[in-house]
Image (spheres, grey):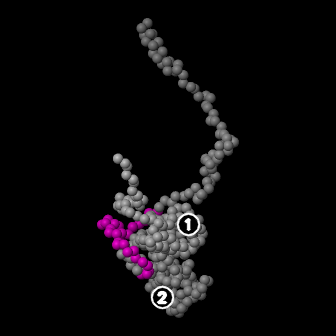
Amino acid sequence: MARPFKTQRDPQATPRRPKTNFTKLADDPNAPPEPTQRLHKLLALAGLGSRRDMELLIASGRVTVNGVPATAGQGVTQYDLVRLDSRPLKLPFVAELPQVLIYHKPEGEIVSQDDPEGRASVFDKLPKVKNAKWIAIGRLDMNTSGLLIFTTSGELANRFMHPRYEVEREYAVRIFGELTEGQMAQLKEGIELEDGPANFDSITAQGGEGANHWYQVILREGRNREVRRLFEAFQLPVSRLMRVRFGPVNLPPRVKRGQMLKLEQKEVVGLLEWADLPVPSAPLRQLTQREKLKATTVFMPKVRKQRVSALDRPPRDATTAEARPYRGKTDAARKEAPKKPAPRKNENRRVRQTSDLAAPAMQKKSDRNRGRG
């Protein structure tokens, strides 16, 4: 009996997706064109950064599409192979619900991933995420505490931070001294700083004790140390600064210093609607009872151990180099290096002989012979 010919098999077939009669897109002239999406938009949705950052990344030549360097504004489909530094990327052509994290930042931590001084960073405590990275929405300097928002969506971060949206930022400020009515009115009208005029949208006195007084201020931009510089214009130093609200997100009272809280799916959907961003059409994933409890629980993050590459390791000091003089040297250098003198043996040391073991036995035998005589 003749062996039948093998039928063509769908290479995309899986146990959950049975094989079907398929036709390649290139071979089907009547097939509709595959919809394209902007590359920098997909990179931002993947959590690699804001759209502006992705445009700069594409301009640097580090991103390739099908082996060719990408260009600004280029469109890609789900069949294109996109790489970043020769590493393939999985782009979210179907939008997924991003993750949003609230962190009550204490003083003494910086909001930066690269610090040559090696200071404590808020990114050292963030939990790991798959196929994405955390983006800090806004910054707080080292001596400022309060609300800090992290998200895996570059578009959502851009909606919060871009100056054209003028998102409100609310702070609780404690100063050494007290403002007059005229000074408060002047802070609302505007004060000329080194980088241009600045003002508070509102400022309200919150009382105080002794020489310290609290104020609640709201402004719509986030220039470097802007709140502190506005008060220092009247020779009133800020002794404590805390952000309590950023746009529609408030710092919950139950989130204490150094603690984190992950927003629920419904709260994330509310943020996307506030930002006029598309909400994923897929239904929300049903959480288990344990996941629901964990999603609403405030937790204290743990500092993750950072793996240091060989290039980033600091040079060895003199003590370490003397303790291990041949570390990192070639064989020729090891041969040329002076050898340590061998330890001298103690010449006066007596070596134990075999006769030392037989002497006691001979002595006992002679004693027995004397007794018989």
Mark 2 burial class by Cα count in 10 Å: few <14, some 14-19, many 20+: some
Query: x, y percentage for residue 253?
Result: 39, 76
Residue 283 covered by magenta stretch:
yes
Of tags 2 and 1, which is closer to the observer? Answer: 1
Image spot of residue 32 (x, y percent): 45, 73
Task: Kindly identify which residue carries mark 2.
Answer: 202
Q: Is disc 1 surrounded by few (<14), some (14 to 19) or many (20+) residues within 10 Å?
A: some
Residue at figure coordinates x 36%, y 72% from the top left: 282
Disc 1 residue type (three-letter): Thr
Instruction: Of the two numbered discs 2 and 1 on the same chain, state the one appearing first in sequence.
Output: 1
Instruction: Provide the residue designation for mark 1.
Output: 64
Q: Position of residue 28 (x, y in %)?
A: 45, 68
- Magenta region, mostly helix, strand or loop? loop
Residue range corresponding to the magenta coloring: 274-303
Q: Considering only vertical position in the picture, is 358 above or below 68?
A: above
- Tell me where residue 278 sits by quadrant: bottom left
The one of 160 and 276 positioned closer to us in this rendering: 276
- Above or below residue 109? Residue 241 is below
Secondary element at tag 2: strand
Question: Which corner quadrant holds the C terminus?
Answer: top left
Q: For the residues marked 2 and 1, what is the alpha-carbon distance in whole angstroms?
A: 48 Å
Confirm whether the magenta stretch covers residue 124: no
Q: Nearer the viewer, residue 5 or 141?
A: 5
Residue drawn where x is 37% and y is 52% of the image: 4
Q: Secondary structure at mark 1?
A: strand
> Label 2 is placed on what type of residue?
Ser
